[in-house]
Image (spheres, rainbow, N blue to C red):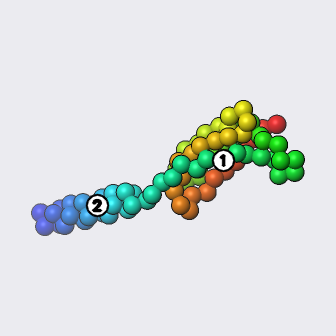
């Protein structure tokens, strides 16, 4: 029984180490942009911009500008009511 617990503790520690190192290697960037209407090219203020992987998000300012921390391969969701 004691041997099994030691083995389990080692396995959990190993998995936590792997997860921690994987998390630290993901490089993040600050994405800056402006949300515009595809037909009229007018900026769209007060739009929601959300990272679908981390669920972090922001709202565009009065001229449609936003900044959001993202990693390579993340997907953004844009939405607006109105």
> In what element is the residue under mark 2?
helix
Nearer the observer: mark 2 or 1; the answer is 1
The relative height of residue 70 versus residue 62 in the rendered view (above or below) is below
Could you tell me residue 72's position as x and y percent?
A: 53, 61
Q: Which mark is residue 33?
A: 1
Give the crowd class for mark 2: few <14, some 14-19, many >=20 residues within 10 Å: few
Give the crowd class for mark 1: few <14, some 14-19, many >=20 residues within 10 Å: few
Which residue: 33% across, 61% down?
Answer: 21
The Cα–Cα distance between marks 2 and 1, rounded to whole angstroms, is 36 Å
Q: Quadrant of residue 68?
A: top right
Task: Give the farthest residue toward the top.
Answer: 62
Which residue: 61% across, 39% down?
Answer: 58
Could you tell me residue 73's position as x and y percent?
A: 56, 62
| Residue situated in front as seen by the camera: 78 or 11 | 78
Which residue: 82% across, 43% down?
Answer: 42
| Residue situated in front as seen by the camera: 45 or 56 | 45
Check whether the beta carbons of the residues at disc 2 and disc 1 lie within 8 A of each other.
no
Q: Is residue 1 visible?
A: no
Q: Quadrant of residue 16?
A: bottom left
Q: Earlier in the sequence, mark 2 or mark 1?
A: 2
Judge from the rendering whether residue 76 lies leftward or rightward of residue 36; answer left or right. Answer: left
Q: Quadrant of the C terminus?
A: top right
- Which residue, given by chain and number where applicable, does mark 2 sit on? 17
């Amino acid at each position: 029984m004691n041997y099994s617990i030691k083995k389990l503790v080692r396995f959990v520690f190993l998995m936590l180490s792997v997860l921690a190192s994987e998390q630290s290697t993901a490089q993040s960037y600050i994405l800056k942009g402006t949300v515009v209407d595809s037909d009229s090219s007018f900026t769209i203020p007060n739009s929601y911009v959300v990272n679908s992987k981390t669920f972090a998000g922001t709202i565009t300012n009065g001229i449609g500008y936003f900044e959001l921390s993202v990693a390579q391969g993340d997907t953004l969701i844009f939405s607006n009511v109105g």
